[in-house]
Every structure is written in C-alpha cells, then in structure tokens.
Amino acid sequence: MTDKNYNEEDIIARLKDEKERAAAFSVIVNRYSQQIYWHIRRMVLSHDDANDLVQNTFIKAWTNIDKFRGDSKISTWLYRIAINETLNFLGKSSNYTVSINSPEGAIAEQLESDTHFNGERADALLQEAIHRLPEKQRLTFNMKYYEEMKYEEMSEILGTSVGALKASYHIAVKKIEDYINSQD
Amino acid sequence: MRIEEHNKNPFSTPTGYFEELNTRIIEATSKTEPIAKKNFVIGNWRRVLSYAAMLAIVALIAGELISGGVRKNEGLATVQEEMTDDNEFYDTLLENYTIDDYTFYCCLTEYE
C-alpha cells in the first residue's frame, strides 16, 4: 500500500477485526519498519542489536494488538514499544557499552572497525558523544536532530513536557559539541 | 566542529536488508497469536466483588468505631444518672428512717 492509499483510521478499524487484523498489521510493518529500525539503530549503534530489537518490537506490537485502543497514532504506539525494548536492552547488555571508566574514543574506535559504519573519524566521535549522553537525553537528541520530529510529537511518545524536551535537547547539543571539541 | 557538519547517517545495513526484514517480521508474527482481551464479565466482576468486600469491611469498622463512641457517651450519662440516683436513694432513706438525723449520720461515719 502506497503512502497515498494509507488511511490510519481504516487501518485501526481493520486491526479490531480478527479477519482483517493480519493484513492490516502487514501494512503497518511495511510502512514503519525502516523508521523504527533507524530509531533503534541510532540508540544501540550495532546493526545486529537493532535487527533483533526491531523484530521484537513488532512481535510485541502484534501480540498486544488488542491493547491498542486507537487513542494515539500507530507510530506513537510503535515508538513507545521500540523505546521500551531498547532501554531494557541497553540496561542489560549492548555491543557498545559506555561506563564511567570507559576511555574516551573507545566507542569511536569500535565504530570505525564496524563493517556497517561508513563514516569518518569525526562521524564516529559524534556518535560516541551522543552515546555518552544519558539514555533519555540521547533519545530526545536523536528524535529531534535525526528524525526531525516536532516537540509535540516527542512529548506524546516520551511522556515529557515540551519545555523539558527543548531544554534537554539544547543541553545535549552543548554537551556533544564540548565533547567533540575536547577530542580535537 | 559543529554537529551540522557531520554525515547525518554514517550507518549502513546489509544489502536487501529491509526487503527481507518485512518478510521476517510478518513470518514471525504469523506464528504467534495476539494475547486475547480479558473477558469483561469475569475479570471485572471479580474486581467489583473484591472492591465491594473491601468497602463492606471498612463500613463495618467505621460503624463499630462510631457506635462504640455513642455507647461510651451513653454509659457516662448512665453513671451520672446513677450518681444522682444514689443521692436520691440516700435522701429517701433519710426520709423513711425512723432514727433521727444525728444517729443516722453517726452510722454513716462508722463505715468511712
């Protein structure tokens, strides 16, 4: 189904019909899988981790489809599941782990040797700077800078006020620029 | 160096990844069933009954506390009445005794 033919109200109605549900869900997968993948990938950095998490996100969305009441947009609902899965994963294990004792530049070096990273040293340092942010601040930064989301939409997904998100984003930008400049 | 000067997406994926991804997700979801919504009647009636039971217990306890206070106050009033009755009792005794007041009061003081 092309974007022109996508009708969210129609999809939500079909999700509630047991006979139409699977077909409607495949439309959702086709429409949102890439977006959700990249959202997760920017948080976990590793393709393998993002691959597992994006599948888990959609499986969780499918098994809990009856809980989706249609009060929010489908994308908002999917983002919330994806963020939940990602934060749980980061709390347990990750191919890219940052701790207080992590030497500066370690994540950048790991990225440069990653076959699914095409950036230069500066890009790797930027990703390290972002990865060193607290998780929720990292989410805010990624959603605003990379996904160009509006603050109102981010507020609905994250359950944080617009004002707090704006402040968090500006602080994140400052921290990232300071870190990159310190590595020059 | 400012953030805007960096490559916006330095990450890549294996060739054909997204075409296969959608197929894999749909295959995985076809093997699992959505969790059925809980039966409204059974699930919610149990909850309603438990709330009703809790309310009943609270009402019982509150009732006991309130009525216990009333009884206590009534008891105090009874004691006060009894005390008054005692005075009347002795007054009556005094009136009905054939002994004179002096002798009666002496008898009373013997038992002090």
Image: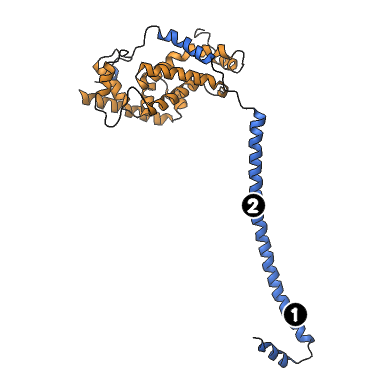
Residue sitting at x 45%, y 26%: A84
Chain B drawn in what color? blue
- The coloring applied to the image is by chain
Image quarter (top left, top right, bottom left or bottom right) of the C terminus of chain A: top left
Q: Residues within 10 Å of mark 1 (few under 14, many from 20)?
A: few
Q: As displayed, is residue B80 above or below residue A88? A: below
Q: Nearer the viewer, residue A34 or B39?
A: B39
Residue sitting at x 48%, y 9%: B23
What residue is pinned by disc 1? B89
Rendered image: mark on residue B61: 2
Q: Which chain is orange?
A: A
Marked residue chain, label 1: B
Left or right position of B44 against A48: right
Q: Where residue A99 appears, x then y in whole percent?
A: 30, 30
Q: Nearer the viewer, residue A12 or A94?
A: A94
Instruction: Give the secondary structure at mark 2.
Output: helix
Q: Quadrant of residue A160?
A: top left
Mark 2 / mark 1, whichever is N-terminal: 2
Comparing labels 2 and 1, the label whose residue is closer to the camera: 2
Q: Is residue B77 visible?
A: yes
Instruction: Give the secondary structure at mark 1.
Output: helix
Q: Where residue B90 appears, x then y in whole percent?
A: 73, 82
Rendered image: mark on residue A31: none
Q: Residues within 10 Å of mark 2 (few under 14, many from 20)?
A: few
Q: Nearer the viewer, residue A12 or A40?
A: A40
Q: Where residue A135 appears, x then y in whole percent?
A: 37, 28
Marked residue chain, label 2: B
Name the residue type under label 2: Ile
Q: Where residue B64 appears, x then y in whole percent?
A: 66, 55
